[in-house]
């Protein structure tokens, strides 16, 4: 898909398509830099200190991507022949190219759910007993918000219960917090409250927070130092990385509060789609900035729907046999959402405007 095709489109494929703000671009140009592998990049150090402080943890590690943050974290927790408990459609399993088996050498124990939220009882039953025939349960990993469930948010009491179970069981708890600031915005609490009961968390700067690249892995200081070696093994040792860390600082200090706007736009979009013949939306799962629409009763196959919608100037993602995903973000206004709604109506009615 070329740049020319994308020009002028309302892009609802993902919040990863957000462009850095002018302030971010200026910060990149002016960033004070050093060699990060030597621990000498002052801008990276400031970003790491800021992330650790915001999340209420001891230390942080700037990494190139959410996948690298998750996998460096998981590999630090788990080893060859061990097992990691995850929700069945968790990003660390579904979208990270079998990295858990490649780097940690561990296998995955999947727990199917309807909404991406594993219950303490489900997790308790999945924890392995001490048996020579079974792998050791090395880690529990949760995702908040949960991408494939439609951006669902873990209730704080559920996280507390899973955290207590993990502590009693002597098993660390990791959070894929790629959109954890969306979770905090939806709950109306500081992000440190959301991650209070997890040991480690990976946060993404380049989704709704608009930074052009990067994530941060956060946790205990000794854990972060061990994860630093995993980052190096994964090719994530960076040099004058302050130029990409600088917009991350702006992301964390100036882009968090506006996420609620994306949530309001997603709710409006979801309600409009749900009112259309042939489209079903589980409105109870539209809690943040992701809307998953089931077009199974529309008479249009998903690939055709996505193509026709793109021809109308709106980009969305195929998300399954009958599912289409829309994601709101900083670069999409309420007016854009209203235009997208009109475009969907035209596609459904087969009356594409040229």
Image: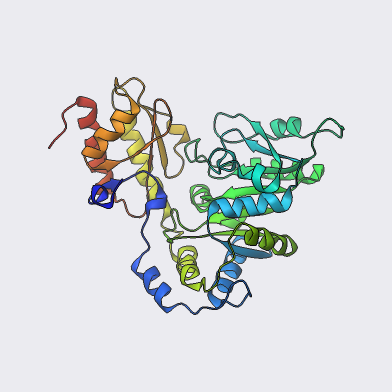
Q: Quadrant of residue 193?
A: bottom right
From the viewer's perspective, tell me whether residue 220 is left or right of residue 248.
Answer: right
Q: Is residue 29 above or below residue 296?
A: below
Q: Is residue 284 above or below residue 339?
A: above
From the viewer's perspective, tell me whether residue 173 is left or right of residue 205.
Answer: right
From the viewer's perspective, tell me whether residue 239 is left or right of residue 86.
Answer: left
Give the position of the C terminus as an image quadrant. Answer: top left
From the viewer's perspective, tell me whether residue 152 is left or right of residue 29.
Answer: right
Give the position of the N terminus as an image quadrant. Answer: top left
Name the outermost residue toward the left: 354
Residue 114: image x %, image y %?
Answer: 55, 28
Which of the colour schemes (rainbow, by chain, secondary structure, one colour) is used? rainbow
Q: Is residue 7 above or below residue 326?
A: below
Q: Quadrant of residue 44?
A: bottom right
Q: Work out whether residue 70 can be spotted.
A: yes
Pick the residue in front: 250 or 19. 19
Residue depicted at 39% across the width and 25% down the height: 322
Residue 329: image x %, image y %?
Answer: 37, 51
């Amino acid at each position: 898909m070329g740049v020319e095709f994308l020009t002028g489109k309302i892009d609802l494929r993902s919040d990863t398509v957000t462009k850095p703000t002018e302030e971010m671009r200026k910060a990149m140009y002016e960033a004070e830099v050093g060699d990060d592998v030597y621990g000498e990049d002052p801008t990276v150090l400031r970003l790491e200190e800021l992330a650790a402080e915001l999340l209420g943890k001891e230390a942080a590690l700037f990494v190139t991507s959410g996948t690298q943050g998750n996998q460096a974290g998981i590999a630090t927790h788990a080893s060859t022949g061990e097992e990691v408990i995850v929700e069945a459609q968790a990003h660390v399993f579904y979208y990270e190219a079998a990295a858990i088996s490649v780097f940690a050498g561990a296998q995955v124990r999947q727990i199917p759910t309807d909404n991406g939220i594993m219950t303490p009882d489900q997790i308790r039953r999945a924890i392995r007993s001490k048996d020579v025939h079974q792998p050791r349960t090395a880690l529990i990993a949760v995702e908040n918000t949960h991408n494939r469930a439609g951006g669902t948010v873990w209730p704080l009491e559920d996280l507390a219960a899973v955290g207590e179970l993990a502590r009693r069981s002597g098993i660390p708890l990791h959070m894929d917090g790629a959109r954890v600031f969306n979770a905090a915005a939806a709950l109306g609490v500081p992000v440190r409250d959301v991650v209070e009961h997890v040991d480690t968390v990976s946060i993404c700067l380049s989704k709704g927070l608009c930074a052009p690249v990067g994530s941060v892995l956060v946790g205990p200081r000794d854990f972060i130092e061990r994860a630093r070696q995993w980052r190096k093994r994964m090719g994530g040792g960076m040099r004058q990385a302050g130029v990409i860390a600088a917009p991350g600082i702006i992301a964390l200090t100036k882009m968090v509060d506006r996420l609620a706007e994306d949530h309001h736009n997603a709710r409006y979009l979801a309600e409009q789609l749900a009112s259309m013949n042939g489209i079903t939306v589980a409105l109870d799962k539209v809690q943040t900035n992701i809307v998953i629409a089931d077009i199974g009763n529309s008479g249009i196959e998903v690939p055709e729907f996505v193509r026709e919608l793109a021809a109308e100037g709106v980009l969305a993602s195929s998300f399954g046999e009958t599912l289409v995903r829309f994601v709101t973000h900083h670069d999409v206004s309420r007016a854009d959402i209203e235009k997208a709604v009109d475009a969907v109506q035209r596609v459904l009615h087969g009356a594409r405007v040229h």
